[in-house]
Amino acid sequence: MAVTSVRTMRIYQEYPEVYDKLYGSLKEYAWESERIKNVLPADATRLVNVGCGTGLHDEYFVDDYDVVGIDASESMLRVAREKNDEARYMQDDMSSFSLDEQFDVALCLFGVVSYLD
């Protein structure tokens, strides 16, 4: 697994609801998502969100795109699935995942790449 630390991963596994309470109050997910949509190709229909966490951004993408979210934490994905039943979520390592499908948009938001070794 390419996550920076086992401790960080443990926090995400054990406290996904705390993540939403903390970051949900600090970030403007609706505003950020709208800004992102404004720069995407008009004909884009399929979106993959790598490091999707609890799906806070995906809530704003599912109405306009077929969303696939990838995250290393099954606990975070459980929360994402509860919020976004229109999206498809998969547990995988963002440094080595493989999908047998194509997407118009690939996102990796909110400093997620900092978790790579």
Image (spheres, rainbow, N blue to C red):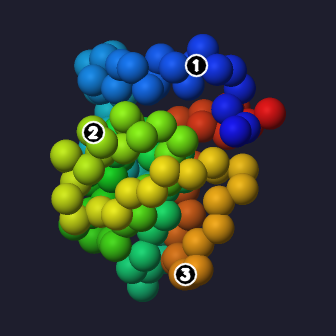
Q: Position of residue 17 (x, y in %)?
A: 27, 23
Residue at 20%, 59% in the rendered image: 85
Circle 1: element type? helix
Cα–Cα gap, marks 1 and 2 = 18 Å
Could one spot residue 25 in this view of the protein?
Answer: no
| Crowd band around label 3 with a 10 angstrom C-alpha radius: few (<14), some (14–19), many (20+) | few
Ranked by sequence position, the earlier of labels 3 and 1 is 1
Q: Position of residue 57 (x, y in %)?
A: 35, 46
Disc 3 marks a residue whose amino acid type is Glu
**Residue with the mark numbered 3:** 101
Q: Are marks 3 and 1 in contact (CB under 8 Å)?
A: no
**Residue with the mark numbered 1:** 8
Residue at 72%, 50% in the rendered image: 95
Query: Considering only vertical position in the picture, is 83 above or below 37?
Result: above
Residue at the outermost bottom position: 43
**Residue with the mark numbered 2:** 79
Ranked by sequence position, the earlier of labels 3 and 2 is 2
Q: Position of residue 12 (x, y in %)?
A: 46, 25
Cα–Cα gap, marks 3 and 2 = 24 Å
